Amino acid sequence: MFKKLLPVVCLAAATLHTQAQYFTLRAAGGYAFPGLQRSEGIMGPKVDPYSPEKDGLLAMSNINDSVPSFKIVNGSYGQGGNFTFAFGYMINNYIGVEMGLSYLKSAKISCDQTRELTIQTGFGNPPAYSAVGYFMNAHIETQAFGLSLMPALVVQGAKPGWKVYPYGRLGISLPVYGALKHTISIDVEDRLFSEAPALANLINQSPFFLGRKTEVELETEGTVSLGFNGALGVAYRPLPYLAITAEINGQHLVTRAKSAEITKWDTDGNSRLEDRGKYRTHFNFVDELNNTSNNADYNAAYDKDKAKDDLRPTGPFSNIGFNVGVNFLLSKETLKKNEKKKPE
């Protein structure tokens, strides 16, 4: 039996050896959508006048205390424009490997909140609060940018001589650089300042740090996260060394936050970052909170001069989209076919 199989194995090895082997350089760009279902929640900065001293990230929501109404914002940071550069090697006409570097800038995700200002006017037991309701309007936007490594296996149905052929790609997504940027614009209604200047003075102080117009920026950095991606496409090869590609691709990725920092808190044009202190501007995300965490809700001996420990939020980056690109096929054979004959 072995003697019969040996010629077959040798023939297969010889065939594999004679098949085309070449390097590839691919550049592509396109747009991606959140996916088939908008079921993933988005995290955003907390805006809550009922407990203004408890900063952090919460599920982004459209809120209106005057109606009242509440609606969670769903979506994905994977929505937006993306560009990929990749270097690969085709072992033969059908199977290859690739290492890609992808850049994503997501579409902006936003929500609006109309919140009633609950202003503490006395510190008895129970404390006293303002009787007349005043409102503030907050517009919150969040957007992601980042780079991901994308090693992948490539399979294509390209027989020698074919100019049009299908291909597929399956790999992993490994974010290596990037952040989420959040901005908040808060407007307090003017009648508070005309009707109750004493209350207006209170919200300008701790724990509110608010004025007529307050502008806030917060940036969140991620830690090690892992996902997977894939694509199905068609390639057109007009020249031996060049292929034009069009594909549908998708990704499943949920990132984990490492830390966050409020980088801007301007009240009527004046910065209040230093007034807020480190505990209310820096956040360290962990998987568990207990009596040793630097968090006032769990540890009465927390340190205001250190970053606040908070539960780790996640960010959805899953998407489905399309890309078009060019793929340069580099081998001795393809380059020779492009060489011009020297004049005699």
Image (tube, rainbow, N blue to C red):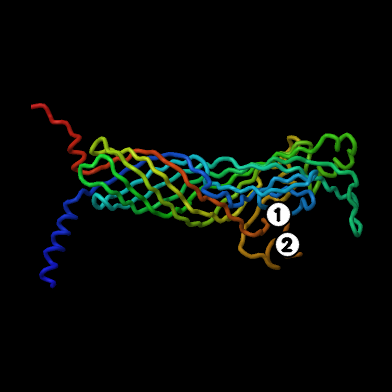
Which one is in front, 52 or 8?
8
Q: Quadrant of the C terminus?
A: top left
- Is residue 297 rendered to the left or right of residue 87? right
The answer to whether residue 36 of the structure is visible from this angle is yes
Instruction: Please report contact status of discs 2 and 1: CB closer than 8 Å, yes or no.
Output: yes
The residue under label 1 is: 279
Q: Which residue: 39% across, 40% down?
A: 28
Mark 1, secondary structure of its residue: loop
- Label 1 amino acid? Tyr
Element under disc 2 = loop
Which quarter of the picture shows residue 13? bottom left
Seen at 34% across and 38% down, the residue is: 326
Residue 64: % across, % down: 76, 44
Residue drawn at (55%, 52%), measured in percent from left and top? 316
The three-letter amino acid code for the residue at tag 2 is Tyr
Residue denoted by label 2: 302
Question: Residue 36, image x and y in percent?
Answer: 52, 48
Circle count: 2
Q: Earlier in the sequence, mark 2 or mark 1?
A: 1
